Image (cartoon, rainbow, N blue to C red):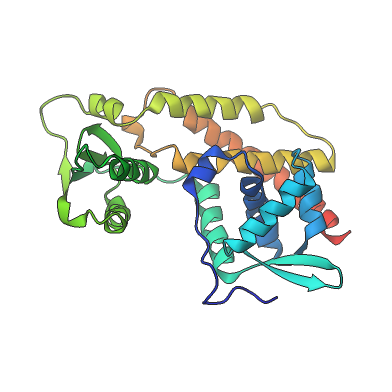
């Protein structure tokens, strides 16, 4: 079978799957982005099944994950005799490359802020609960916080394009208004931040990440491959959890700073031996 063409399914990023992160399909996505994408080569079903087994994913679940991921347009199967190997589709490769750029650079960018807020006003009637839920979920995923009903804010003015896309998809653009503004003299800016985002929950997630990986020291090739995969798999969630506020808006001793250092250090340290072990398994 060939690569998914223009008439085939178009892969999408499921933010719900990214945040939950425990499914076979989510683990498979991590393997595709961390090893299959940079290798640039097709990968046998048996390789993916065997590696997923390192994470206690049963063969049936692994094969189902492959089939569903292919049905979503990420992968294309190629039968060689009685065996099947998988190659990334062009759209799948593009989305994985974009995801890799977001994951590896997350938390390490310039936190300089000019003090401006993007303010979005959009009101949905209480009776339209499903639409309200979709709007809240998608704007949260895009990094917006809501300090009060109908008001959404972010210190990243460039997020206006994301907001417009969300509002267009939900047919709410004609009911919304947006402004760029500095915080005024009334009230406290940090109080607004506390009302808009649950940073304590994000900090707890960072602390758990640090506890899991800071002291981890795998020694065997399989253990390093497993550790590197889990490191990236867990880190993938944070771009959807952390609004990446400027330093001056963060609590003192923000745990995200240390978590970023742990990720960067471990990923660099484990990357070469993990890639080498993947190559060995893929070639066997």
Residue at 16% from the left image edge and 48% from the top image edge: 179
- Whether 57 is drawn above or below 275: the answer is above
Can you give x and y, in whole percent of width and height, for residue 193 in the image?
Answer: 28, 29
Can you give x and y, in whole percent of width and height, for residue 208 in the image?
Answer: 57, 25
Quadrant in the picture for residue 265: top right
Residue at 49% from the left image edge and 43% from the top image edge: 16
Quadrant of the image for the C terminus?
A: bottom right
Q: Can residue 181 be seen in this view?
A: yes
Can you give x and y, in whole percent of width and height, for residue 252 in the image?
Answer: 39, 22
Quadrant in the picture for residue 5: bottom right
Between 221 and 165, the one lying in front of the other is 165
Q: In this view, does 281 lie to the left or right of 18?
A: right
Residue at 37% from the left image edge and 24% from the top image edge: 251
Report the residue that reaches farthest toward the front. Answer: 127
Between 247 and 135, the one lying in front of the other is 135
Report the residue that reaches farthest toward the right. Answer: 284
Between 213 and 160, the one lying in front of the other is 160
Residue at 86% from the left image edge and 68% from the top image edge: 82
Q: Is residue 107 visible?
A: no
Report the residue that reaches farthest toward the left. Answer: 185
Quadrant of the image for the N terminus?
A: bottom right
């Amino acid at each position: 079978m060939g690569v998914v063409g223009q008439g085939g399914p178009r892969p999408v990023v499921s933010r719900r799957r990214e945040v939950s992160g425990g499914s076979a399909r989510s683990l498979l996505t991590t393997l595709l982005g961390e090893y299959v994408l940079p290798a640039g080569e097709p990968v046998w079903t048996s390789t993916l099944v065997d590696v997923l087994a390192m994470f206690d994913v049963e063969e049936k679940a692994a094969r189902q994950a492959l089939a569903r991921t292919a049905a979503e347009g990420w992968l294309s199967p190629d039968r060689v005799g009685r065996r099947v190997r998988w190659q990334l589709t062009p759209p799948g490769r593009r989305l994985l490359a974009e995801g890799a750029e977001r994951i590896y650079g997350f938390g390490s960018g310039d936190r300089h802020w000019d003090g401006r807020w993007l303010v979005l006003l959009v009101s949905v009637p209480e009776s339209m609960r499903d639409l309200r839920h979709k709007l809240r979920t998608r704007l949260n995923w895009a990094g917006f916080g809501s300090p009060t009903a109908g008001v959404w804010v972010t210190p990243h003015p460039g997020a206006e394009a994301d907001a417009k896309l969300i509002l267009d998809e939900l047919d709410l653009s004609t009911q919304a208004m947006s402004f760029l503004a500095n915080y005024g003299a009334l009230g406290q800016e940090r109080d607004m931040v506390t009302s808009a985002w649950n940073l304590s929950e994000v900090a707890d997630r960072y602390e758990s990440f640090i506890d899991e990986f800071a002291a981890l020291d795998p020694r065997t090739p399989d253990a390093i491959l497993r550790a590197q995969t889990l490191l990236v798999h867990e880190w993938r969630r944070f771009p959807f959890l952390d609004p990446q506020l400027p330093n001056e808006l963060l609590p003192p001793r923000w745990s995200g700073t240390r978590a970023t250092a742990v990720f960067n250090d471990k990923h660099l340290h484990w990357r070469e031996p993990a890639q080498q072990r993947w190559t060995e398994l893929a070639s066997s």
